[in-house]
Amino acid sequence: MTVKTGGAIIQISPQEAPERANDSAEKKDSGSFWTHRAFCIGNKRQAMGKGGETMKTIRLLYPDYVSGGLDTYYFGAKLLAHILPANEKQALLEVKIAPPDRRERHVTEGVYAKDEVVAGIRQAAEVIEAAKPDRIITIGGNCVVSQAPFDYLHGIYDNVGIIWIDAHPDVSSAKDGYPNAHAMVLGSLMGSRDNPLTDLMKNKKFRPDDILYIGLQELHSYQEKFLQDMKVDYQIQTEGFVSEDEIKGFLSRFNHILIHLDIDVLDASQFHSTYFANKEMVGDGSGGGRMTMQELSDILKCITENTDVVGFTIAEYLPFDEHQLHRMFADIKIFTDE
């Protein structure tokens, strides 16, 4: 396992990974509230476990790109690891995904590059289980990177809710005709029988009422059918996002929260490192998000300052311009000379 702490990278074996702190976390505050600007203010929580010890937080760099069929996911994950605020107390562990090779993969059992997707999820689970963290910040990569950390955290905590901040529901199955696994991950976390990734789950499945969507846009008919059949309570949020009271009510029901943030929830006309800012991208035919950066910031501050967030995934960061610049310089001799 590769571990980066501060500026140094070291190798540790699973046997050397420190033991995870006790599972219990400080109980959530009940006095949080929203202001009229949808900006949540409350008492900040201490990241402390039972007995006052500091909870162990890791950063999991998981640059999966095959699940989304796009090389820029790999580059974006590596860049995102540098963009996030530095914190020497949070070891950086990496799921070793081979760099993009421009090779076309096959669709197997309805999933593009299934063997590589499965291998990545299994490796991520192994890295996490060896480190035994209390909290995980996952740096993607595309949306499939949430499966292993959310499954693990659901195994060590009770009463866990998921806030899925995304323009899309991510509940597709192999039979729906779109083979990229990044559109399937929440379906597998809920235990969908038609989802080929469900068998990789090691812990209990999430219930439909454990899920809150924020930023969800228009659905395909098969996505709508899945959510209705599973009795997931959701709202299409083309004109506005879920209300302040609904978010507060959701937080109050759980001891711990997992956040999945798909960057494509942002309005592509205002933030350009997202799938839908690239006019060449068609995906499964869905549209992009409508959220502003300020709206996203307000929502994230509310959640993180007023509940016990034990998992936070950032996925689908696609810096197309920066990737093109990188490729251009890679062809310039002075940069590659020994």
Image (cartoon, rainbow, N blue to C red):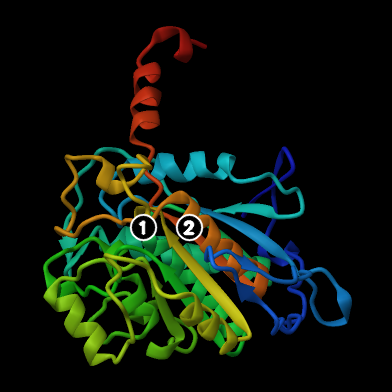
Which comes before the other along the chain, label 1 or label 2? 1
Percent of width and height locating residue 139: 51, 54
Q: What percent of the width, then of the height, locates residue 178?
A: 16, 64
Which mark's residue is nearer the viewer, 1 or 2? 2
Front position in the image: 52 or 94:
52
Find numbered disc 2 in the image and state the secondary structure of the residue it sits on: helix
Query: Is residue 295 or residue 37 the one in the foreground?
Result: 37
Q: Which residue is mark 2?
A: 296
Q: Is residue 47 visible?
A: yes
Which residue lies under the disc numbered 1?
Answer: 265
* Residue in the image at 35% along x and 15% along y: 331
Front residue (pair 201, 32): 32
Badge number at residue 118: none
- Residue drawn at the location 66% of the way across and 77% of the way down: 32
Residue 118: x and y in percent read: 36, 66
- Who's the residue at 69% across and 44% down the image? 86
- The quadrant of the rendering that contains the N terminus is bottom right
Q: Image height check: is 90 above or below 147? A: above
Residue 238 position (above or below residue 94): below
Q: What residue is at 45 percent from the left and 15 percent from the top?
A: 336
* Residue situated furthest top in the rendering: 334
User: In the visual, does 108 lie left or right of 61?
Assistant: left
Residue 234 on image: x %, y %:
32, 81
User: Given the current orientation, which residue lies at the most extreme right position?
Assistant: 51
